[in-house]
Amino acid sequence: MNRLSSHRTRPARAERGQILVILALGMVAFIGGVAVVIEGGNAYAHQRITQNASDSVANAGATILAQRLGGGNQSDADVLAATDAMATANNLDSYAAWYTNVTGGLLNAAGATVSNPAAAAEVGSGAIPPGTQGVHAAGSQAFETTFARVLGFTQFTTSADATAVAGAITGGEFLPVVFPVSLANCDGSGDTVVTDEPWRLSNPNANPNLPPVGQEYIVPLCKTGTGAFQILDLDPNKDCEEEVMNPTSVHFNQFPVNVLVDEGNDCAKKIEDSISAKDLQGKVVMIPICDGACHTQDSGNDKSYHIIRIASFYLDYISYSNNDNNGACALATSPTYGTDLDNIVGGNGSSSCIAGWFVRYVTNGPVGTGQINNGEAVGVQLIR
């Protein structure tokens, strides 16, 4: 009997051994499933981190190019220093960057478009190719795993690409006024008189609480031959006050472009009050500028201004008055900063004016190709 009993217990032990093997395999499968979920989420988070880092590297390089396009003498070494610093700040393990045109096409040393990064001019190669307006960056970052270690994976790597370009601003949120591309004044009847001298650009102040370093201007907003002052209707669905308080982002596909005049009742006064209410004094605003004497095109309800570019303007004050000789438009010294105001464009017939500095600050926004002209705003745009 004992012998028979002994034979009966062997299959039970074998079954228990099989169950343990199945349980062990099941645990591995379970842990593997957990690893896929957890590591997948971890990888997604690190992918976003790497993408943001690559975006920052591309933007840093394009910002240096924007300064160069704006008249600076920045070199390839400056671009490399900026991209290196941003890659380090964002903890990228490795990155490479190449020069591009305004559409993101890779450029070789001669400025020709190429499709292969191996043939493209790399940042740090010693020279910036002709026609360069952007930087393409490719970065990577490794991260440690957790549950995936059970499956033999101790580390994963994420990578991401980004391209940022620089150029003349073609869109954004604008103050709904307009003025000539060159120094201008108003004659005794308020009509615009333009000289050939361009507006002189100012530089940022080392102290951010102080105004730019350079010449402050009084820019008269003269009336046109049809009686309309230099005020734009950038959004027909908003009145003058709304266009300042809650501006619509406008993108001009190309220049020149005709923009309608806003002839709303008391529009000038509403803009002045809105600028004060929004506390735009001491801020850089974007303003469309027009060619020639800045007279309106067409007539009737379809009057428009011929806009040729966008300017960045550090705003001191704006003043509207029914008096043809508005005292605020004829000041020699700024009541805000005590700076000298250019008397070339004093208000001798202008009832409306805006005072401040033309600046070439680099800002974000859609950009275009072509030469950067005097007084033109320069921007950086992340395109991919």
Image: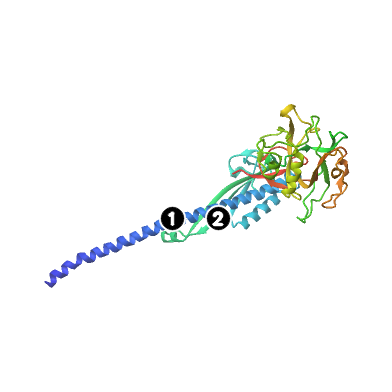
Q: Position of residue 193 (x, y in %)?
A: 85, 34
The answer to whether 32 appears left or right of 337 in the picture is: left
Say which quadrant the C terminus sits in: top right
Q: What count of labels does the image hold?
A: 2
Amino acid carrying label 1: it is: Val
Residue extending furthest bottom? 2
Give the vertical position of 163 relative to 94 (above or below): above
Helix, strand or loop under label 2: strand
Which quarter of the figure has residue 4? bottom left
The residue carrying pointer 2 sits among few (fewer than 14), some (14 to 19) or many (20 or more) residues within 10 Å by Cα, namely: many
Helix, strand or loop under label 1: helix
Give the vertical position of 1 relative to 185 (above or below): below
Q: Which residue is mark 1?
A: 37
The residue nearer to you, when weighing 220 against 366, is: 220
Judge depth for marks 2 and 1 and give the one in front: 1
Amino acid carrying label 2: it is: Gln
Is any part of residue 247 visible from this angle?
yes
Residue extending furthest left? 1
Residue drawn at x 34%, y 59% is 26
Task: Compare marks 2 and 1 and give the one earlier in the sequence.
Answer: 1
Q: Which residue is mark 2?
A: 141
Give the vertical position of 299 relative to 287 (above or below): above
Q: Position of residue 211 (x, y in %)?
A: 79, 52
Residue extending furthest top? 299
CA separation, marks 2 and 1?
20 Å
Which quarter of the figure has residue 309? top right
